[in-house]
C-alpha cells in the first residue's frame, strides 16, 4: 500500500449537500421509527407472531368442515388493572372441527354503582395458530358499555381454519378486559361506534 | 451432539473445582450458614457432577461406565488429598455453572451450554496462545526485529470460513433443541400464570380454583433484624403444585407490567405480558421443590417475587387438587359466616402483611407521598364507604391497586377491619365479608 | 471547502480567546474535543459512583444501604449515564481531537454546529440528573425503559427523562453529521478512502449508524411521551397497543447502539497495536470490510434481546442465525490484531497494555455473546447476571479500555508532555484486576440463577457478590488515579517529541506536540 502512487483526489462535495443528505436520513429514520408501528401490525397480522388475533373474518367461500379432526379451543378471561367487572367464559373449552363455525359466550357483569365501558383485547396461544383462527363475530370488535349492576352474555363466533398445522391440537384464546373509563349514561345506539381501536 | 459423554465428564470437571481452589486461597471468611469443610463440599460437588453425567454414560456401554467410575474414584482421591491439605472453612455454594436441571429441556440446554462453552475455550486457547507467544517471544526488549507482512489472502479467507463452519456446527444442535422446546402437543395439566406487582397468581384452568403466591420471607430477615433462613427470598406462602411425569402447560399473562416466570431447573423462562398470552411447558420426572424468580424488571419489589414449584406424585397431586377445590368452596361459605371483630382482626393482620405492608408498612406509616400513611388517616378513621371503594377498586392513576379480584371477600373485609382498628385507629367498626360481597354485587 | 476556509479566516491569526468565552464560544476542534473528553470523564465518575452504590448494596444479602426504589433508580441512571454520558461523548471527543489531525484538515467541517452539539450535552444531563431530586425520584425502569413500566407505571420524572434523551439524541446526530462531512470533504489531497486511518473509517461507519438509529430512539421516546400525555396507545394493550412493539423498536435502536459504543475503539486499538508492534496493521482492507459487515448485520439481529417474549420459532431461528453471523467479522478483527502482534517487535507502554487487555477481554465478552446468541440456551441466560457479565466484558474492556488506550496514546500529542508511565501502568494493572474481579464472578452468578436488577439476593449468591463488589470498589477507586495522571501530564512533565511512539504512523504525528491551536492550515500531501 505504501508504495502505491495513487494521487487521485478524494471526491469533494459541498458541506451543505452532505448535511442535506444526512438530515434527510435523520428525518427518514424518525419516520421509519413510527412506520414500524403499522408495519409491525401488518407483519403480525400476516404472520400472527404476537398472538393478537385479526379483525372480522370475511370470506365468501364457506369452508368444508373437516369431521375427522378435532381441535380443542380453550377460553381464558382476565381483568386488566382496576377493572372490577366479573368476566368469564360461559364454557371453559370446546372441541371443534376445523372449518365449522362455532358460537360461544362470555359473561360480563358490572358490579359497581356506576356505568362503565369495557374493551376486551384478544390474544391466542400458541401464536403460530393465530392466522388460522378466524372470528366472524366478536364482542371484542366493539367496546362494551354496562350500566351499574348490569350483566351481559357476549357472543363470539369463530372458525378454526382447516389449514391449522397438524401438530397444534389445542388453541387457547385469552381475553383481557380493560376499563375504558366510567360513563354516566350510555346510549345504546352508540355501542357499535365506540371502538377506539380495530384490534379485533 | 454426543461428542462422547465421558469427555463431558472430564471437561465439566475442573471448571468449578479449579476456580474453587483459586478462590478459596484468596478468600476465607467465616460462613454464617452451612458450615462445611472444604473436603466435604469438594467431594459432594464431584459426586453431584458424576450423578448428573450418569444418564449420558449409560448409553455408552460398559467401558465408559468403567472409565467413568475410575474417574470418579480418582476425583474423590484428589479431593480428599486436597481437603487434607487445605482444612479451610468455606462459604456456601460456590455454584459456578448452570444446573443441568431436572427436565429434558434443561438437560439439553445444559449440554448445549457446555458444548458452546468448550468450543469457545478451545478457540480462546488457540487465539490467546498465539498472542501470548508473540508477547513472550517477539518483545522488543528481547531484541525482536519486526517482520513487515501485512496481508495474506489465504489466511484471511481461511479464518473467515473456518469460524463460519464452527457456527454452523453450533447452530444445528441449537435448532434441534429449540424445535423441541416449541412442542405444542396435548398437555395433561394447564395452569394460567398471571404476574402482578409483585406476586404470581396461579389458576388451574380445568379445576376451577386459583390462588396468589406471595413471597413469605419475613421483612425482618430482609432488613437484617433476624437471621436469614435457608430459602431466603426463594420461599412463598402458596407454591404451585404440579404432578410429576405429566406434561404441564403454562399460559402466561400479566396484569400490570411485564414479568418473566423462570424456574432454572426446568429450563423454562417466559415473559408474562399484559394483554397477551404466552405459552410454555414442562415435564418434571423427579419430585421435589424447585425455586426460581421473576426475571423481568417489574418495579420496586422485582427482587421479591419468587416462584416455587412443588412437583409431587400424581396421587398426591390429585389429593391436593381436591383439597384446593374444597378450600375454594369453604372460602365461599366463610363469606356467609358471622364474624367477630377479633376474628377479623386476626385474619386481617395476616392479609395486611402479605397484600399491603410492602407499601403501607407493617405499622401503617406508609411511605409518603407515593404510599400514604393509614395510621390516623381520615380514610381509615371516618369514610368507611370510601375505604371499601379504594381497597376493592383501587385508585386509578396511583399505585393503589384494585384488590377486589386479588383477595377473597373474607380477606378484603378482614383487611379493611384491621386497618380501621390497628395502630391506634380504634374505630371499633367492623366490615363483614357479606358486606363486601354485597358491595361487589350491588344492584 | 471554501465555506470552511472562510469561517476560519479570522481565527487563523490569533490563538484561543481568554477566559470563559474561549470555552463557551469556541469553534476549535481541539477545544471542543477536550471539553467532550472532560465532560465524559465527569459523567464516568458520576455513573461510576452510582455503580458503587449498587455494588455496596449487593455486598451482602439483605437491604443495608438503599431502598429497592432507589436501587432501581441507580441501575437505570448508571446505565443511561455510562452509555450516553460517558462512552459516546468520549468517542466524540476523540473524534473531534483526532479526525482533523488524521485526515489533514484544519478543523471539523461544521465548527459552529460542533460547539452547539457539545453544549447541548451538559443541558441534557443536567435535566437527567435533576430527576434524582424530583418527587417520585429518577427513572427507575432500567436503561432499556420497557413499556408499560416506563409509561403507565413510570414516575412523574419520565417526561424529563424523555426530553433529556431527545436533547442528547440531537447532540449525537449533529456530531455524526459533522464527522461525516469532515471525513467526506476535508481529507488531505491524496488520501483516498482506502488510505484513511482505521479510526477514521470506524468513525465514519459509526456516524452512519448514529444517523440511522438515533432518530429511531427519538421516535420511541416520542411515542412514550404521547402514550403518557396525549392518550395514544402505542404500547398500552388496553388501547389496542402492544408492549412487545416497544421492545422491537427499542432494540432496533439498541443493537446498533452497542456497536456505536465499540466500533471507534476498534479503530483506535488497530493503530495502537500496530504502533507498539512496530509493524503495519495486518489486513487493513479486511478490517474495513469487517467493520462494514458488523454495521450492516447490526440492523438484523435486534430481537436476540427478546428471545423470551414469545416469538414464534421462525423468528427465533432467524435472529439466532443472524446473530451468530456477527461472530465472523468480529473474529476476523481479533485474528488481524493478533497477527499484527505476531512477529512484531513488541513493547508494552500503557496504551499497548490497555490494547492487549482490550483484545483478550473483549474476546471473552464476544464468547459469552456467542453463548447468549444460542436461543435455547438464552432461555437460561436471559436477564440474569450472565448478561450483566457479558455486556460489562464488552463495554468496560471494550469501550472504556479502548478510550484509556487512546487517551494514553494521544496524551503526549494533546498536552505536549509524556504522562507518568509508572503511574499509568499502575492504573492499568489495578483496573485490569479490579475489572476482572468485579465482572468475572458475575458469569457464575448468572449461571447459578441470579436475576439481574435485583437489590437483594438469595444466600447462595453471597460469596461471588462480595468478590464482585470488592473488585468494583477497586476498579472505581483506581479511576481517580487516572484523573491524577492526566492532570499531572497536562501541567508538566517530560517534553514530548512530535512523534513519541517510534512505531506510530499517521498525519497526527507530523505536527508538533502539543498540537498547535491551528493545524494543517495548508493541507498536507498524502502519497
Image: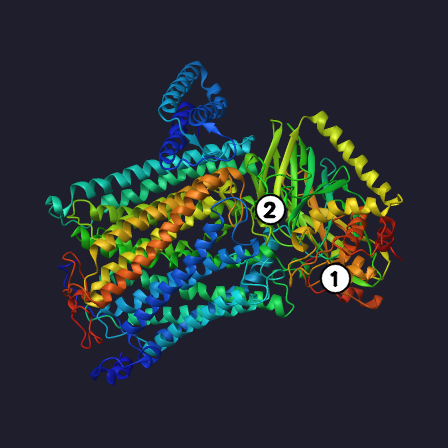
Residue B419 shown left or right of residue B432 in the figure? left
Say which chain tag 1 marks: B
x and y percentages locating residue B233 in the rendered image = 59, 42
Looking at the rendered structure, the secondary structure element under dot 1 is: loop
> Distance of mark 2 from mark 1, alpha carbons?
28 Å
Asked if the residue under mark 1 is in contact with the one under mark 2, i.e. CB atoms within 8 Å, the reply is: no
Question: Which residue reaches farthest bottom?
Answer: C10
Q: Nearer the viewer, residue C420 or C1?
A: C420
Residue for badge 1: B377
Dividing the image into 4 quarters, which one contains the N terminus of chain C?
Answer: bottom left
How busy is the neighbourhood of tag 2: few (under 14 within 10 Å), some, or many (20 plus)? many
Question: Which residue reaches farthest front?
Answer: B424
Mark 2 or mark 1, earlier in chain? 2
When asked about the image quadrant of residue A137, the answer is bottom right
Residue C153 shown left or right of residue C399 in the figure? right
x and y percentages locating residue B387 in the rendered image = 79, 59
Say which chain tag 2 marks: B
Residue B340 shown left or right of residue B292 in the figure? right
Residue for badge 2: B304
**Residue C153 visible in the picture:** yes
Amino acid at each position: 500500500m505504501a508504495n502505491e502512487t495513487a494521487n487521485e483526489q478524494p471526491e469533494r462535495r459541498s458541506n451543505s449537500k452532505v448535511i442535506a443528505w444526512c438530515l434527510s436520513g435523520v428525518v427518514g429514520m424518525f419516520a421509519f421509527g413510527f412506520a414500524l408501528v403499522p408495519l409491525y401490525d401488518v407483519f403480525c397480522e400476516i404472520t400472527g407472531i404476537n398472538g393478537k388475533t385479526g379483525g372480522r373474518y370475511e370470506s365468501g367461500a364457506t369452508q368444508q368442515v373437516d369431521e375427522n379432526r378435532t381441535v380443542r379451543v380453550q377460553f381464558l378471561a382476565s381483568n386488566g388493572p382496576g377493572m372490577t367487572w366479573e368476566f368469564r367464559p360461559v364454557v371453559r373449552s370446546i372441541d371443534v372441527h376445523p372449518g365449522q363455525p362455532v358460537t360461544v359466550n362470555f359473561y360480563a357483569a358490572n358490579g359497581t354503582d356506576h356505568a362503565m365501558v369495557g374493551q376486551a383485547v384478544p390474544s391466542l396461544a400458541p401464536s403460530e395458530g393465530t392466522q388460522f383462527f378466524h372470528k366472524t363475530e366478536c364482542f371484542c370488535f366493539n367496546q362494551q358499555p354496562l350500566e351499574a349492576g348490569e350483566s351481559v352474555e357476549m357472543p363470539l363466533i369463530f372458525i378454526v381454519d382447516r389449514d391449522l398445522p397438524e401438530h397444534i391440537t389445542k388453541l387457547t384464546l385469552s381475553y383481557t378486559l380493560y376499563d375504558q373509563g366510567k360513563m354516566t349514561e350510555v346510549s345504546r345506539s352508540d355501542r357499535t361506534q365506540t371502538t377506539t381501536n380495530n384490534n379485533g | 451432539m454426543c461428542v462422547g459423554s465421558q469427555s463431558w465428564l472430564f471437561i465439566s470437571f475442573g471448571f468449578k473445582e479449579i476456580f474453587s481452589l483459586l478462590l478459596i486461597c484468596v478468600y476465607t471468611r467465616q460462613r454464617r450458614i452451612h458450615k462445611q469443610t472444604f473436603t466435604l463440599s469438594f467431594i459432594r460437588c464431584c459426586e453431584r457432577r458424576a450423578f448428573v453425567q450418569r444418564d449420558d454414560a449409560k448409553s455408552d456401554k460398559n467401558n465408559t461406565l468403567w472409565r467413568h467410575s475410575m474417574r470418579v474414584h480418582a476425583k474423590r482421591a484428589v479431593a480428599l488429598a486436597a481437603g487434607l491439605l487445605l482444612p479451610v472453612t468455606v462459604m456456601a455454594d460456590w455454584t459456578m455453572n448452570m444446573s443441568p436441571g431436572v427436565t429434558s429441556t434443561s438437560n439439553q440446554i445444559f449440554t448445549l451450554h457446555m458444548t458452546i462453552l468448550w468450543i469457545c475455550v478451545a478457540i480462546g486457547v488457540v487465539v490467546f496462545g498465539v498472542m501470548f507467544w508473540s508477547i513472550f517471544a517477539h518483545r522488543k526488549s528481547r531484541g525482536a526485529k519486526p517482520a513487515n507482512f501485512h496481508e495474506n489472502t489465504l489466511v484471511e479467507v481461511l479464518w473467515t470460513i473456518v469460524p463460519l463452519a464452527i457456527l454452523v456446527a453450533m447452530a444445528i444442535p441449537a435448532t434441534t433443541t429449540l424445535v423441541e422446546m416449541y412442542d405444542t402437543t396435548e398437555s395433561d395439566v394447564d395452569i394460567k400464570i398471571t404476574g402482578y406487582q409483585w406476586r404470581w397468581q396461579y389458576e388451574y384452568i380445568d379445576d376451577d380454583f386459583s390462588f396468589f403466591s406471595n413471597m413469605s420471607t419475613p421483612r425482618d430477615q430482609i432488613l437484617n433484624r433476624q437471621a436469614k433462613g435457608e430459602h431466603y427470598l426463594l420461599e412463598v406462602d402458596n407454591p404451585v403444585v404440579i404432578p410429576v411425569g405429566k406434561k404441564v402447560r403454562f399460559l402466561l399473562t400479566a396484569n400490570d407490567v411485564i414479568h418473566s416466570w423462570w424456574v432454572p431447573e426446568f429450563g423454562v423462562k417466559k415473559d408474562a405480558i399484559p394483554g397477551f398470552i404466552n405459552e410454555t411447558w414442562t415435564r418434571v420426572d423427579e419430585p421435589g421443590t424447585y425455586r426460581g424468580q421473576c426475571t423481568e424488571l417489574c418495579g420496586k419489589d422485582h427482587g421479591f417475587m419468587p416462584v416455587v414449584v412443588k412437583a409431587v406424585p400424581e396421587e398426591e397431586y390429585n389429593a391436593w387438587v381436591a383439597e384446593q377445590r374444597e378450600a375454594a368452596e369453604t372460602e365461599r361459605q366463610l363469606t356467609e359466616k358471622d364474624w367477630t371483630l377479633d376474628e377479623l382482626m386476626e385474619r386481617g393482620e395476616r392479609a395486611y402483611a402479605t397484600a399491603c405492608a410492602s407499601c403501607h408498612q407493617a405499622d401503617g406509616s406508609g411511605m409518603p407521598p407515593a404510599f400514604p400513611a393509614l395510621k390516623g388517616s381520615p380514610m381509615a378513621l371516618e369514610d368507611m364507604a370510601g375505604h371499601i371503594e379504594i381497597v376493592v377498586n383501587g385508585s386509578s392513576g396511583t399505585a393503589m391497586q384494585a384488590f377486589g379480584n386479588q383477595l377473597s371477600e373474607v380477606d378484603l373485609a378482614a383487611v379493611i377491619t384491621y386497618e380501621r382498628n390497628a395502630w391506634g385507629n380504634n374505630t371499633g367498626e367492623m366490615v363483614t365479608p357479606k358486606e363486601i360481597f354485597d358491595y361487589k354485587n350491588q344492584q | 471547502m471554501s465555506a470552511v476556509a472562510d469561517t476560519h479566516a479570522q481565527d487563523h491569526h490569533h490563538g484561543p480567546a481568554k477566559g470563559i468565552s474561549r470555552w463557551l464560544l469556541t469553534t476549535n476542534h481541539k477545544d471542543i474535543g477536550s471539553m467532550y473528553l472532560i465532560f465524559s470523564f465527569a459523567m464516568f465518575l458520576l455513573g461510576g459512583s452510582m455503580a458503587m452504590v449498587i455494588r455496596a448494596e449487593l455486598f451482602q444479602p439483605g437491604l443495608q444501604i438503599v431502598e429497592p426504589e432507589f436501587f432501581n433508580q441507580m441501575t437505570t441512571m448508571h446505565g443511561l449515564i455510562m452509555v450516553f454520558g460517558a462512552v459516546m461523548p468520549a468517542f466524540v471527543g476523540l473524534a473531534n481531537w483526532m479526525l482533523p489531525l488524521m485526515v489533514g484538515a484544519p478543523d471539523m467541517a461544521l465548527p459552529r454546529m460542533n460547539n452547539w452539539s457539545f453544549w447541548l450535552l451538559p443541558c441534557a444531563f443536567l435535566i437527567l440528573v435533576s430527576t434524582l431530586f424530583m418527587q417520585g425520584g429518577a427513572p427507575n425502569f432500567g436503561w432499556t425503559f420497557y413499556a408499560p413500566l416506563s409509561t403507565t407505571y413510570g414516575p412523574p420524572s419520565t417526561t424529563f427523562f424523555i426530553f433529556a434523551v431527545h436533547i442528547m439524541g440531537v447532540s449525537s446526530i449533529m456530531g455524526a453529521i459533522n464527522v461525516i462531512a469532515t471525513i467526506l470533504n476535508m481529507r488531505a489531497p491524496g488520501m483516498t478512502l482506502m488510505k484513511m486511518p482505521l479510526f477514521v473509517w470506524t468513525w465514519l461507519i459509526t456516524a452512519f449508524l448514529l444517523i440511522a438509529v438515533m432518530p429511531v430512539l427519538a421516535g420511541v421516546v416520542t411515542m412514550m411521551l404521547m402514550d403518557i400525555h396525549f392518550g395514544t396507545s402505542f404500547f398500552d394493550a388496553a388501547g389496542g397497543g402492544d408492549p412487545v412493539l416497544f421492545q422491537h423498536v427499542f432494540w432496533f435502536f439498541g443493537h446498533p447502539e452497542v456497536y456505536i459504543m465499540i466500533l471507534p475503539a476498534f479503530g483506535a486499538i488497530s493503530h495502537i497495536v500496530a504502533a507498539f508492534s512496530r509493524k503495519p496493521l495486518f489486513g487493513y482492507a479486511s478490517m474495513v470490510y469487517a467493520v462494514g459487515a458488523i454495521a450492516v448485520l447490526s440492523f438484523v439481529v435486534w430481537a436476540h434481546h427478546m428471545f423470551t417474549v414469545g416469538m414464534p420459532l421462525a423468528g427465533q431461528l432467524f435472529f439466532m442465525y443472524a446473530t451468530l453471523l456477527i461472530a465472523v467479522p468480529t473474529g476476523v478483527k481479533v485474528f488481524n490484531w493478533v497477527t499484527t502482534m505476531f512477529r512484531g517487535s513488541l513493547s508494552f507502554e500503557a496504551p499497548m497494555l490497555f490494547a492487549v487487555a482490550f483484545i483478550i477481554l473483549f474476546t471473552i465478552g464476544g464468547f459469552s455473546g456467542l453463548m447468549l446468541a444460542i436461543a435455547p440456551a438464552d432461555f437460561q441466560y436471559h436477564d440474569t447476571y450472565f448478561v450483566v457479565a457479558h455486556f460489562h466484558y464488552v463495554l468496560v474492556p471494550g469501550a472504556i479500555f479502548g478510550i484509556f488506550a487512546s487517551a494514553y496514546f494521544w496524551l503526549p500529542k494533546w498536552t505536549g508532555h509524556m504522562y507518568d508511565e509508572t503511574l499509568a501502568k499502575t492504573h492499568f494493572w489495578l483496573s485490569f484486576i479490579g475489572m476482572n474481579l468485579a465482572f468475572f464472578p458475575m458469569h457464575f452468578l448468572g449461571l447459578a440463577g441470579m436475576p439481574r436488577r435485583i437489590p437483594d439476593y438469595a444466600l447462595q449468591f453471597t460469596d461471588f457478590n462480595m468478590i464482585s463488589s470488592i473488585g468494583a470498589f477497586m476498579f472505581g477507586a483506581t479511576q481517580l488515579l487516572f484523573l491524577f495522571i492526566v492532570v499531572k501530564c497536562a501541567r508538566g512533565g517530560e517534553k514530548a517529541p512530535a512523534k513519541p511512539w517510534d512505531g506510530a504512523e499517521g498525519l497526527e504525528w507530523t505536527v508538533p506536540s502539543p498540537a498547535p491551536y491551528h493545524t494543517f492550515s495548508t493541507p498536507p500531501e498524502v502519497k
